[in-house]
């Protein structure tokens, strides 16, 4: 654990460092509260041991600055001082300190109190990781790793509103696997799952890092492309279609399955209030036209010209 010690008594700083040496902590000692605060702005320290009375910035003032800041993660703070009255202890803890140790202290007690802080920080880290995993589970489709429907709905709605305010073009692609039921019927659901993951890989490979890509439901996928017109979005969808056609999946029985997809494209109309439902409906109508025209093609909503299709 990286530990920052602030004390204007060089001897006490050496005592603290020596006392914590058996636990192999990485200890940095500075001579006052201001030096500690300056260092915390540049380097991460999860645990701080600070004297109360120091020139410039006192221990309680340092504690209050830390608590009022936006430092990453939680900082566990032990206030170290010769003051030992009940009023001083209460004042020190009310400033935001987590623990209080009176001088002169027993090195074993110092190690024990630091050990408590390390365990609390470890618990905080594990809780943060658990919350991150829960967020991932709530936002991402477990099979494909893409955004799930609820997450992409929320993010796409926000992106459309932002594009409208900025006067920016935004396009949407609704993409569907052709004859997907036959894949499940012939090869089984594990093969169907592999096909969906294969499509997800192709979508990630052919979109930009800031494009939104999600599983809309079943074998349908939704892409939101900020700054892209419908022609450009259609080209993206066609690259995905061509990539899938060029990379068959090996089946357990030795077959090589070529995936075919159809896609409908719609865009945000300049000057209109964006509604995700309306744009999805337009893309869905274009997707239906692609299916009716023979599948394995890309159709732009309201486009009277020829669609992008397989040769």
Image (cartoon, rainbow, N blue to C red):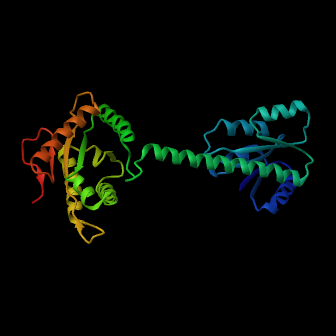
Of 78 and 128, nearer the camera is 128
Q: Residue at x 36, y 52 (%)?
A: 209
Task: Give coordinates of residue 285: x percent, y percent.
Answer: 17, 38
Residue 116, above or below 98:
below
Of 98 and 40, nearer the camera is 98
Left or right: residue 266 versus residue 57 is: left
In the current view of this chain or complex, which residue is farthest to the left?
305
Residue 55, above or below 39:
above
Left or right: residue 252 versus residue 45 is: left
Q: Residue at x 88, y 54 (%)?
A: 108
Q: Image quadrant for the C terminus?
A: bottom left
Residue 115, visible in the rendered structure? yes
Count of all numbered marks drawn on residues in the image: 0
Of 311 and 94, nearer the camera is 311
Task: Give coordinates of residue 246: x percent, y percent.
Answer: 21, 65
Q: Residue at x 42, y 47 (%)?
A: 140
Task: Give coordinates of residue 28: x percent, y percent.
Answer: 74, 56
Left or right: residue 155 versus residue 71 is: left
Task: Give coordinates of residue 244: x percent, y percent.
Answer: 23, 60
Residue 54, visible in the rendered structure? no
Residue 270, above or below 8:
above
In the current view of this chain or complex, which residue is farthest to the bottom?
254
In which image quadrant can residue 204 be found?
bottom left
Q: Image quadrant for the N terminus?
A: bottom right
């Amino acid at each position: 654990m990286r530990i920052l010690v602030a004390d204007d008594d060089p001897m006490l700083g050496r005592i603290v460092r020596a006392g914590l040496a058996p636990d192999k902590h990485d200890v940095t000692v500075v001579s006052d509260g201001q030096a500690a605060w300056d260092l915390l702005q540049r380097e991460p320290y999860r645990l701080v041991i600070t004297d109360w009375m120091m020139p410039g910035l006192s221990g309680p003032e340092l504690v209050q600055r830390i608590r009022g800041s936006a430092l990453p993660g939680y900082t566990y703070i032990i206030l170290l001082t010769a003051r030992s009255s009940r009023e001083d202890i209460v004042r020190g803890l009310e400033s935001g300190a987590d623990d209080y140790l009176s001088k002169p202290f027993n090195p074993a007690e110092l190690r024990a109190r630091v050990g408590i802080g390390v365990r609390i920080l470890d618990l905080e880290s594990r809780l943060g990781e658990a919350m991150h995993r829960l967020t991932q589970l709530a936002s991402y489709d477990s099979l494909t790793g893409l955004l799930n429907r609820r997450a992409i709905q929320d993010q796409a709605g926000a992106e459309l509103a932002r594009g409208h305010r900025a006067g920016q073009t935004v396009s949407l692609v609704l993409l569907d696997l052709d004859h997907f039921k036959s894949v499940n019927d012939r090869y089984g659901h594990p093969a169907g799952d592999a096909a969906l993951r294969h499509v997800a890989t192709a979508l990630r490979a052919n979109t930009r890092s800031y494009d939104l890509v999600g599983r809309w439901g079943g074998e349908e996928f939704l892409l939101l492309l900020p700054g892209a017109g419908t022609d450009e979005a259609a080209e993206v969808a066609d690259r995905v279609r061509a990539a899938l056609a060029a990379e068959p999946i090996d089946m357990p029985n030795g077959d090589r399955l070529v995936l075919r997809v159809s896609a409908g494209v719609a865009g945000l109309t300049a000057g209109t209030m964006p509604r995700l439902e309306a744009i999805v409906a337009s893309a869905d109508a274009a997707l239906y036209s692609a299916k009716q025209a023979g599948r394995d093609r890309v159709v732009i909503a309201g486009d009277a010209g020829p669609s992008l299709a397989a040769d």
